[in-house]
């Protein structure tokens, strides 16, 4: 198996790793929650990112929230099978820096940026050094950046593929 990323809706994703593990990120919207999780990652505590009740869980399922991902000002790293997660800053005027994260996920030598709830931040210049293959950007323009600001972020990060998500407020 090569590993796959499925967009479920809003800012919700399912990752199927090359070694067959199932990982959900910010479950909330859409369909595609039928496969039991080996891990669930949450970027922050808002209800539109924390629908863990939608997900069936395998025994030993890990739940990683922003509390584990950001401890004492340090952004942590996690591995689930052969998929690695690097917590990164995510914040804006409605989302305090200390209460949320984004993730740069590495799978099959490809890097995928999941933003959490953020707007353009100076740290995105560091993300550009990561060699990101796929980057997702919030574009609702209410709780996060709008399309113009997302385009600026895409230019800064320079991912091979830039994809809009979180397209409307909940």
Image (cartoon, grey):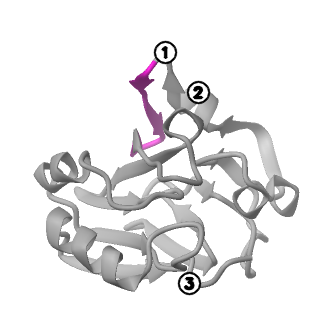
Q: Mark on residue 167?
A: 3
The relative height of residue 86 versus residue 29 in the rendered view (above or below) is: above
Residue 16 or residue 125, whichever sits in front: 125
Q: Which contiguous range is marked in magenta?
A: 73-86
Q: Is residue 115 left or right of residue 30?
A: left
Mark 1 and mark 2 residues within 8 Å of each other at the beta carbon: no
Mark 3 and mark 2: span between their CA atoms? Answer: 27 Å
Indicate the secondary structure of the residue bearing disc 3: loop
Residues packed near mark 3 inside 10 Å, few (<14), some (14 to 19) or many (20 plus): some
Indicate the secondary structure of the residue bearing disc 1: loop
The relative height of residue 67 versus residue 83 in the rendered view (above or below) is: above
Q: Earlier in the sequence, mark 1 or mark 3?
A: 1
Mark 1 and mark 2: span between their CA atoms? Answer: 10 Å
Q: Is residue 86 left or right of residue 29?
A: left
Indicate the secondary structure of the residue bearing disc 2: helix
Magenta-span inclusion, residue 28? no
Q: Quadrant of residue 96?
A: top right
Viewport quadrant of the N terminus: bottom left
Viewport quadrant of the C terminus: bottom right
Q: Is residue 155 left or right of residue 99?
A: left
Q: List the residue tagged with mark 2.
A: 68
């Amino acid at each position: 198996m090569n590993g796959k990323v499925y967009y479920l809706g809003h800012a919700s994703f399912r990752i199927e790793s090359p070694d067959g593990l199932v990982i959900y990120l910010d479950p909330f919207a859409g369909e595609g929650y039928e496969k039991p999780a080996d891990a669930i990652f949450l970027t922050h505590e808002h209800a539109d990112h924390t629908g863990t009740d939608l997900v069936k869980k395998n025994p030993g399922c890990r739940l990683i929230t922003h509390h584990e991902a950001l401890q004492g000002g340090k952004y942590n790293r996690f591995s689930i099978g052969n998929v690695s997660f690097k917590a990164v800053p995510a914040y804006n005027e409605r989302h305090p820096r200390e209460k949320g994260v984004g993730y740069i996920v590495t799978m099959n030598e490809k890097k995928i940026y999941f933003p959490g709830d953020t707007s353009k931040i100076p740290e995105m210049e560091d993300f550009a050094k990561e060699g990101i293959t796929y980057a997702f950007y919030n574009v609702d323009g209410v709780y996060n950046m709008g399309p113009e600001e997302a385009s600026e972020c895409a230019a800064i990060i320079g991912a091979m593929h830039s994809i809009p998500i979180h397209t409307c407020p909940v």
